[in-house]
Image: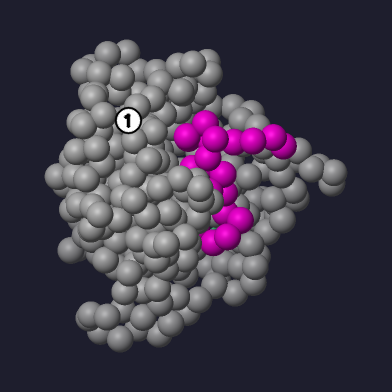
Amino acid sequence: MNVLEVRGLSVEYAAPGGAVHAVSDVSLDLRRGEILGIAGESGSGKSTLAHAMSRLLRPPARVTAGAVRYCPPDDAEPVDLLTLDRAALRRFRWKELAVVFQSAMNSLNPVSTIGAQIDDVLRTHRTDMSKADRRERAVELLGRVGIDPERRRSYPHELSGGMRQRAVIAIALALNPQIIVMDEPTTALDVVVQRDILHQIKELKDEYGFAVVFITHDLSLLLEIADHIAIMYAGRVVETAPARSVHEAPRHPYTLGLVRSFPKLHGPREELLGIPGTPPDLRSLPPGCAFHPRCRFAVDACRSHRPGLLTTDDGVQVACALHDASVYAGDLPAELSPREETR
Ligand code: SF4
């Protein structure tokens, strides 16, 4: 059952040389209690998508089309977040949807203690809670994210980077939201702390039942924690599949390039491939498939036909001409074919 449905979402930035189409016609489903990973290189549109889903875009960015529907847990009518007025949006944020961004230092108030910042959220949204209840909740939340509750008296600059990011997660959890959008939440941290926090997010998700949209350029992280993964390229989703399928049998050449850019820790050795070239200028995309100048599988049709998302027999969504029999009559390369074990 979905908790969030993104439909046909497009976002552009007004710029002197012409509009930058950062997100184009993106549709995604976030199921209740799952982690949906969104991966892609810098400039693929994933952070713009996160901001648009959370109604945090600022000019010159603007949504030009689409809807972001929140489906309440009580089977009430879905709500399009893009149509909420300010007051409704204020009520909605934190309570139903919370956000965690990369730089905890930018999210936290530097002149307020961690405890006071948790208290602020509770005081604003839970007017039924007494001061003692709020203090108890702050202690509980800090304990749950692995921070000694005594540190609630600390200011952000007195905490390590990892502890600050944990504190932001504690604040995000304060009102038991249904959805947490996390945009590169562990990118600035060293790998050991990063792994610790990832596992903690997964444990918290299992305990509290919220769903997560987890955005990162590092696909290897998503393979560890995500249930489903969407791959973005040049503002569009080019593949959506269960994490295992993305790992074992990527269907889009770009996904294959991302998967083969880092070494596998288990199984037979595979040559590291990487992806040649650089992402395109979003103001003037190449004709046809935007990935064709970098794609080693490109055929003639790729230069004129822009592939839409098609659903394969085993439920993977992929936007590539090679999977579309109406455009390409040849055999699908073995590297882009489904594997028996992921069916
Ligand atoms: Fe490559 Fe063509 Fe598929 Fe684009 S449509 S990813 S260029 S094979």
Please, what is the three-letter code of the amino acid marked with disc 1?
Answer: Leu
The reply, left or right, for residue 193 in relation to residue 208 is right
Above or below for 246 versus 12 = below
**What is the x, y in percent for residue 255?**
44, 62
Disc 1 CB within 8 Å of nearest ligand 1 atom: no
Question: In the rendered image, which quarter contains the N terminus?
Answer: top left
Above or below for 326 versus 147 = above
The answer to if 40 sits in the magenta stretch is yes
Using the rendered image of the protein, determine whether residue 141 is visible from the camera's viewpoint.
yes
The reply, left or right, for residue 266 in relation to residue 56 is left
Q: Residue at x 34, y 51 (%)?
A: 153
Q: Residue furthest left?
A: 207
**SS class, disc 1:** helix
The answer to if 254 sits in the magenta stretch is no
- Which of the pair 170/198 is nearer the observer? 170
Q: Residue at x 26, y 29 (%)?
A: 131
Using a 10 Å C-alpha cutoff, classify the residue at mark 1 as few (fewer than 14 neighbours), some (14 to 19) or many (20 or more): many
Q: Residue at x 54, y 35 (%)?
A: 56
Using the rendered image of the protein, determine whether residue 314 is visible from the camera's viewpoint.
no
Q: Which residue is mark 1?
A: 122
**What is the x, y in percent for residue 292?**
61, 61
The reply, left or right, for residue 142 in relation to residue 284 is left
Above or below for 310 versus 184 = above
| Bounds of the magenta segment | 39-60
In the rendered image, which quarter is residue 75 located in?
A: top left
Above or below for 27 versus 275 = above
